[in-house]
Image (cartoon, grey):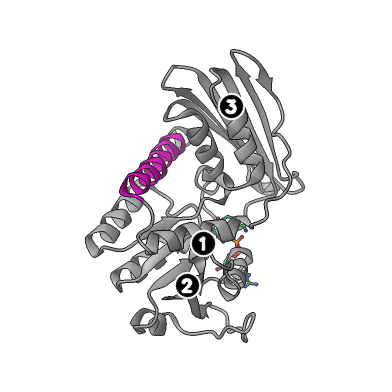
Amino acid sequence: MFGAVVVGVGTAGSVRIRDLVAPLAGSAAEKLTIKGFISRRSLGDQQGVSQISREEAVSREDVQAAFVCTENVSHEENIRTFLQAGKHVCVEYPMTLNHQAAVDLWDLAQEKGLVLHEEHIELLTEDYKLLKKETEGKILKEGTLHFTGGALKPGFGALVFSGIARLTWLVDLFGELSVTAATMEEDAGKNYSKMTANMLTSDNRPLTWIEERGPGLPRAKNINFHFDSCTLTQIPPAPRGAVGIFMQDMIHFSAKLAGQVSPEELQREKTRILHCFHVAERIQKLCQS
Ligand code: NAD
C-alpha cells in the first residue's frame, strides 16, 4: 500500500480526495490509501479526511506519495519539496511554468528513484479517444484548434502553460511540432487575452493553436482539421466512459508506483511532456518579443 496526501483542495484536489476515498474496485488505485490533505486554509475534515501540515506529510513514513493540486504557480515548489523528502508525486498539469524547471524536477525524481507523474486527463476523455481514432491513418494537410474559456484565475500562469492540455492534444495527434510565429492580444482592463501560435508538423503541415480567454466566453474547443480524405470540423461527441477521467489517471499513476508501466511507455510520456514544455516556452518567447 502507498499512503498518499492531497495538496490543495480546490476543484481538482476535491476530486482527488473523492477518488482516493473510494478507488475503483479491482484497480491499481486500490493500492493508494489517503492519510490526509494539506491546505493553506484551515478547513475541517473533507470527505472524512483530516487536514495535516505539509511538514507532517513530508516527515511521515506512512506517506509515500503526494497529489499536487494547487494553482499552477505553486506546483514546482511543492513537487520539489515532496521529491526531496523521498515521496512520489502526481501533479495536475502543467507541472511547471517553464521547460527547465520540468527537466530539473524529472532529473531529481530519477536521481531519487521516484515516480513523477503529470496528470493529462484531456487524453483520457471519450471524445478525445474517438477523435484520435478518427484521425488515425489520415494525412493532415492543415489544421486549427481554437479553445475559448472564461478568464484565467490568478496563479494559473501564462495562457500557453495553463492551456498546455490543448498543445498536448495536438502533439499526441500529429507528432512533434515546431513553432513559426506566435502573437498575443491582451486587454487587461477587460481580463481578456488571446494567443495565436503557428506551428508546423514534421511533414511541414501548418497547425494553428488559438487559446482565447475572457469573462463570459464559453468553454469550448473548435477544430478544423483538413486531411487528404476529409475535413473534421467537430469533435465527435462520445458517451461518457464508465470510469471517470481523474480515476483513470489515478489508476495510471498507481500502476507506475507498482512498477507495472514499461520503461518505454514512461520514456514516451516524458518525451511528450518535455516536448510540449519546449514548444510552449518557444511560443511564450515569441509572444513576448
Ligand atoms: P481551484 O481554483 O479550484 O484551486 C486552486 C487552488 O486554490 C487550490 O490549492 C485550492 O486549495 C485553492 N483554493 C480554492 N478555493 C480557495 C479559497 N476559497 N480560498 C483560498 N484558496 C482556495 O483550481 P483547480 O481547478 O482545482 O486547479 C488546480 C490544478 O489542477 C491546476 O494546476 C489546474 O491546471 C489543474 N487541473 C484542473 C482541472 C479541473 O478540472 N479543475 C483539470 C485538470 C487539471
Please tell me how crowded label 1 is: few (under 14), some (14-19), or many (20+) other residues with Cα within 10 Å.
many
- Under mark 1, the amino acid is Met
Q: Which residues are magenta?
A: 262-285
Please tell me how crowded label 3 is: few (under 14), some (14-19), or many (20+) other residues with Cα within 10 Å.
some
Q: Position of residue 95 (x, y in %)?
A: 44, 55
Q: Position of residue 35 (x, y in %)?
A: 48, 82
- Give the number of the disc on residue 135: 3
Residues under labels 3 and 2: Cα distance? Answer: 36 Å
Residue 284 lies within the magenta run:
yes
Residues under labels 1 and 3: Cα distance? Answer: 27 Å
Q: Earlier in the sequence, mark 2 or mark 1?
A: 2
Q: Earlier in the sequence, mark 3 or mark 2?
A: 2
Q: Residue furthest front?
A: 26
Q: Quadrant of the N terminus?
A: bottom left
List the residue tagged with mark 1: 250
Q: Residue at x 43, y 17 (%)?
A: 203
Is 107 situated above or below 2? above
All told, the count of numbered labels is 3
Callout 2: SS: strand
Magenta span: chief secondary structure:
helix
Callout 3: SS: helix
Is 259 situated above or below 140? below
Q: Residue at x 55, y 72 (%)?
A: 20
Q: Earlier in the sequence, mark 1 or mark 3?
A: 3
Residue 107 lies within the magenta run:
no
- Give the number of the disc on residue 32: 2
Can residue 154 be seen in the rendering of this structure?
no
